[in-house]
Amino acid sequence: MEVLILAVLLFSVYCSNLQSVEFQPDETFWIASSVRFDKFLMGDFDSPIWNEPFVNYEVRPIPSYIVAISQRLGGARTAALPVYWDWALTKDQNISRGAMPSNPVIWWSRLPMAIISVFSLLGTIILIAKAHSRLAAYVFTLISFNDYFLLHLRRAMSEAPLLLFTVLALYASYKLLMVIQEKSIKKVILWSMTVGIFCGLAGQSKLTGLACMAIPILGALILIFRSAPTSQIVRFRILLIVAGLVLCTSLLLFVASYPFFYQNTFYRTLGTFYFRNAVIQGQMKTYASQVILPPSRLNILFQRIFHYPIALDSNGIASSLFHWINFFIVAFGTAHLIMQVWKKERGWEKLVILLLGALTCAIPMLFVPFDWDRYYLYPIFFSCILFSIGISQLLFMWVSHIQKQIGENLRQRMGSEGI
């Protein structure tokens, strides 16, 4: 019943006023390339659509597949789709050439992103409740309505699918750690392949999603060497099974979900990463004013990431104060999780998965060259989780202290009255 109520609340907010979400010109790439899904379903792997160099190397397919399903359900056909946005032209020029989606097209393209974002947040809420407490889950629910999530998780872009498959990978990684403890090789194989599937889909939502592959592998490594003593051979065999299956399944699905890779597979797969690096190098020259310089990196990242979850729409001392409050609560939550894992408290396997998620997914994003807000999704998402746990633990400690003080006062009063 709790989950149902939270689902209704999240759906009512995330699925309303979708057309009021600020338009990002990059949305046109996923909206227009949704026709790839039709070719994928028909098995038309020789279509010219798989030979658009920039789009096929740079625009990941999973978000466009999800957009396509909704567009078809809404009756949006190929003729109604916009052309790709040309960043070399002005906004008016792009509008005149048909690069601005119509209101119905953009609504149907954003709707599935809002829906899967709700499922991502619900999955996170359930995971936090199981890993820490209901209070932490409710705190995260309130945080979920922040401006950052409501903007980036409702656009027809890659952020919503990336988050969905990341959350699924986190949950599957936890289940994998559970079956490792059961010492069931069949279940270890099953869950290793399952988490590999989610990692592959995360990678085809956005390349940074491939970082999810490290979560189950590192989690298995920590669990195996912190669990009950077993022979070195058994430990190494389980770790080898997990690492091998996660990596192979992830990469196989990464390729299988994208017909562009069916020809010259090795060359095009490596070319994807090379092309991404080349695009970044070109963007650093084109958008030099938006590149984060080394002396200012820490300050900029601190302001962007710790503007949430307690956000204050103002500048100056008050805003800076809230940034520091957010930072210290996140740091406290992180320290609390580390201590719980170190002590191997009950349910520590869920906690180690959350910590590894923050380590492998969020930290690498701190080194991106641009001060572009959508690049902060992982850091902000995991900082919101750690904040929820941190503030909840502080409240538990405060309530425990109050109860202790009341108990001591009662004992003193009863002692003075000779009771």
Image (cartoon, grey):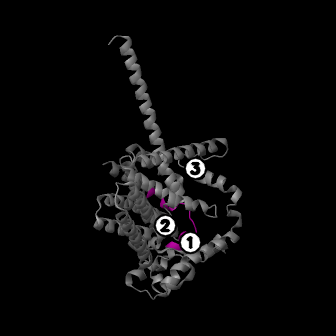
**Which residue corresponds to mark 3?**
306
Does the rendering let one see residue 71?
no
Label 3 and label 1: CA atoms lie apart by 33 Å
Q: Residues within 10 Å of mark 1 (few under 14, many from 20)?
A: many
Q: Is residue 178 above or below residue 327?
A: below
Label 1 or label 2, whichever comes before in sequence order = 1
Which three-letter amino acid code belongs to the residue tagged 3? Phe
- Which contiguous range is marked in magenta? 14-30
Q: Is residue 27 magenta?
A: yes
Residue matched to label 1: 100
Quarter occupied by the C terminus: top left
As drawn, the residue found furthest toward the top would be: 417
Is the residue marked by circle 2 packed among few (<14), some (14-19), or many (20+) residues within 10 Å? many
Please name which of the two marks, 1 or 2, marks the residue nearer to the observer. 2
Confirm or deny contact between disc 3 and disc 1 (CB under 8 A). no
- At label 2, the amino acid type is Gly
| Vertical comparison of 380 with 24: above or below | above
**Residue 373 on image: x %, y %:** 59, 59
Numbered disc 1: secondary structure: loop
Residue with the mark numbered 2: 209
Mark 1 and mark 2: span between their CA atoms? 28 Å
Report x, y in % for residue 239: 39, 65
* Vertical position of residue 95 compared to residue 373: above or below: below
Q: Left of 256 or right of it: where is 4?
A: left
